[in-house]
Amino acid sequence: MKPRYWTRATQTLAASDAVMKKLITAHKTLTVGSRGDAFQTLSRAIVGQQISVKAAQSVWDRFAAAHPGVTPEIVCASSVDRLRACGLSGQKSAYLFDLAAHFRDGRLDATQWKKLDDETLITLLTEVKGIGRWTAEMFLIFNLARPNVFPVADLGLQKAMTLHYNRGRKLTPQKMHRIGAAWAPWRSVATWYLWRSLDPIPVEY
């Protein structure tokens, strides 16, 4: 589903940046998508850490079958042995229990997130064991469709900006921020098109 701001963002970026105009023209039929449920999306992110997409899907399928609905309450009522039987490590099991507890007791309350700015929400998400800043930023872009997230630690973004804005020479985070400042308040959109320049198949998160 296309975010309401997408057309305005692409028009603004294309009008002010020649590289963006080229990338937007090349990929104009594609937009960011979302899996929906916040708890399930973050759970999937934890399950998929450091394993292949295929392996992650297999583990997730077993996990979801053993925990119908995949709600915080259901996960909290589970056990380490049950999660391990799904193919999860002890560490990932602990991460999932911590995530579920954050949702169950209200430390993470999706109904309140619209009131929070990006950095405040990233801080809340990274208080969960196993969720770092990069995971939180991907969640804000792909699940919440926040328009102005700029994940400078992302390797794909670094590679694309190096290619398109610095003739293949490595960029420092500071230089990336200086270049990206011109894309505000649509830095998520600019990031998405830079990703597409390396991989035309859009990511689902």
Image (spheres, rainbow, N blue to C red):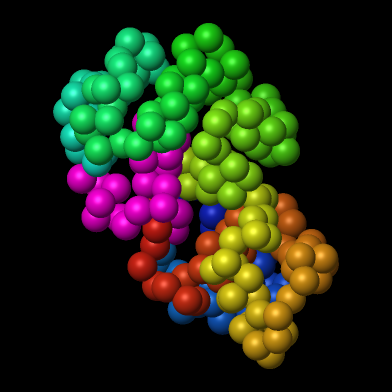
Q: Report the number of numbered marks.
A: 0
**Magenta span contains residue 203:** no
Residue 34 lies left or right of residue 55; in this view the side is right
Given residues 87 and 63, the one toward you in this image is: 87
* Span of residues in magenta: 31-58
Q: Where residue 90 appears, x then y in whole percent?
A: 38, 32
* Residue 22 appears in the figure: yes
Residue positioned 24% across, 55% down in the render: 54
Residue 10 lies left or right of residue 70; in this view the side is right
* Residue 172: quarter of image: bottom right
Residue positioned 57% across, 29% down in the render: 128
* Residue 180: quarter of image: bottom right
For residue 136, above or below residue 180: above
For residue 155, above or below residue 7: below
Q: Where residue 150 appears, x then y in whole percent?
A: 67, 55
* Residue 44 appears in the figure: no
For residue 95, above or below residue 34: above
Residue positioned 67% across, 50% down in the render: 148
Given residues 161 and 55, the one toward you in this image is: 55
Q: Where residue 32 appears, x then y in whole percent?
A: 45, 54
Q: Where residue 185 appears, x then y in whole percent?
A: 72, 53
Given residues 85 and 68, the one toward you in this image is: 85
Residue 112 lies left or right of residue 2; in this view the side is right
Residue positioned 37% across, 46% down in the render: 48
- From this viewpoint, which residue is outermost toward the bottom? 167
For residue 145, above or below residue 198: above
**Magenta span contains residue 47:** yes
